[in-house]
Image (cartoon, rainbow, N blue to C red):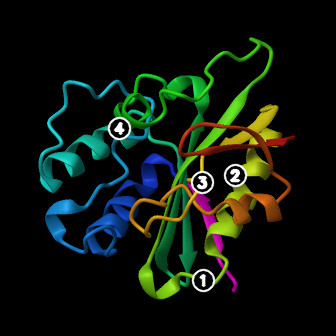
Amino acid sequence: MNLEIKKLVLELAEEYLRFFDTTPHSTNQAEHRCYCVCWCAANCELENFSNAEDRRMAVERYVKENQMKGYLAYWGNRAVGWCNANTKSDCYECRSWRMFMGEINTEEPPERKVKSVFCFAIAPEMRGKGIARQLLERVCEDAKADGFDIVEAYPNKEFINTEDDFMGPIQLYKRLGFSECYETEKKFVMRKEL
């Protein structure tokens, strides 16, 4: 599949929002659109994310402030996929890290720079076509070019459902040279040395 992968920049903010506005995921109900708002460099503890409109407004601000990082996948002129990838240490205060990642090691040697992959969202009709793989390949390429030492990801040990397995399947990471670094009660920590 011939995709174009673009790093999220301010000029793509409206396309990013449109992707989440129009792409069914999770419960397929508009009020549950996540906008990937809880995985970013912003300390969003005091934000009100109780409805999709508030989440959309917050993430629009995060994109403009360069606190939301990741990549959009395009097929033709349409965004069909998203991968959230950010500097690991920049995200320790984000809401989702505090909620779901308490068992993940945050003690890295200061000279080691880690890029974390937090989320994939793929348009339902485009799933199973290798979009997540192409997004992950681009994350790794750019991380190496940007001086990162490691790319890290946190897939669930067992498949639950599409909504809960937004961090991608373990097989995706293994195919691209990631290995299991350690495990927590519910997750594998997968790493790729660059």
Q: Earlier in the sequence, mark 4 or mark 1?
A: 4
Q: Earlier in the sequence, mark 2 or mark 1?
A: 1
Identity, as a three-letter code, of the amino acid under mark 4: Tyr
Q: Are marks 4 and 2 in contact (CB under 8 Å)?
A: no
Q: CA distance from mark 3 to mark 2?
A: 22 Å
Q: Are marks 3 and 1 in contact (CB under 8 Å)?
A: no
The residue shown at (35%, 38%) is: 62
Residue 86 placement, left or right of 45: right
Q: Which mark is residue 139?
A: 2
Magenta run includes residue 3: yes
Residue 76 percent across, percent down from the top left:
55, 84
Residue 183 percent across, percent down from the top left:
66, 39
- Helix, strand or loop under label 4: helix
Q: Which mark is residue 45?
A: none
How many numbered marks does the figure carry?
4
Q: CA distance from mark 4 to mark 1?
A: 30 Å
Badge 3: how crowded within 10 Å, few (<14), some, or many (20+)?
some
Instruction: Determine which residue is flagged by label 3.
Output: 157
Identity, as a three-letter code, of the amino acid under mark 1: Gly
Q: CA distance from mark 3 to mark 4?
A: 30 Å
- The residue range painted magenta reads 1-7
Q: Earlier in the sequence, mark 3 or mark 2?
A: 2
As rendered, which of 57 and 102 lies closer to the eye? 102
Q: CA distance from mark 4 to mark 2?
A: 20 Å
Identity, as a three-letter code, of the amino acid under mark 3: Lys
- Helix, strand or loop under label 3: loop
Magenta run includes residue 12: no
Q: Which mark is residue 62?
A: 4
